[in-house]
Image (tube, grey):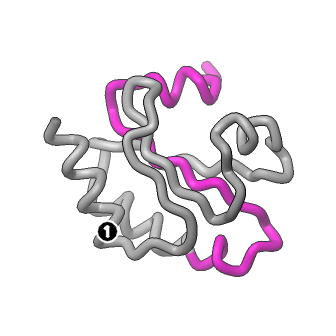
Amino acid sequence: MNQTFTDIINSNKPVLVDFYADWCGPCRTMKPILEEVKQKVGDHARIIKINVDANPAAAEAYHVTGIPALLIFKNGKIIWRQAGVVPAHQLVHQLEKIIEQ
């Protein structure tokens, strides 16, 4: 069963969304960082990537003006957001705070 973006972000499990583009150098920097974050938070959070070139409506809906843009959703609400490359420890810290709520 394919879940829609809306279904995914409406989960009560935190969802880290990485808005990116293939041509974006800093976006490529995020790939190993996100893999490290996934290893550390495991199944307690979900990480998805949204290509802004392929999904401009999603980027516009969430006011993504710079990439990479990282947003954490829980129950359909944006809990945290930051543009630019974010270190793994900072993302893990944000997710852990939200998981514990």
Three-letter amino acid code of the residue under disc 1: Gln
In the image, 21 versus 41, the foreground residue is 21
Residue 31, above or below 71: below
Circle 1 residue: 90
Question: Which residue shows up at 36% across the image and 38% down it?
Answer: 14
Question: Which residue shows up at 39% across the image and 24% down it?
Answer: 75
Furthest residue toward left: 100
Is 58 contained in the magenta span? no
In the image, 70 versus 13, the foreground residue is 70
Is 26 contained in the magenta span? yes
Residue 78 location (% of width, % of height): 45, 37
Q: Is residue 90 left or right of residue 20?
A: left
Question: Which residue shows up at 24% across the image and 61% down it?
Answer: 93
Question: Which residue shows up at 84% across the image and 46% down it?
Answer: 54
Q: Is residue 27 left or right of residue 9?
A: right
Q: Quadrant of the N terminus?
A: top right
Question: What segment carries the magenta color?
Answer: 1-29
Q: How many marks?
A: 1
Residue 53, above or below 77: below
Q: Quadrant of the C terminus?
A: top left
Residue 18, above or below 58: below
Residue 8 location (% of width, % of height): 52, 28
Give SS at disc 1. Answer: helix
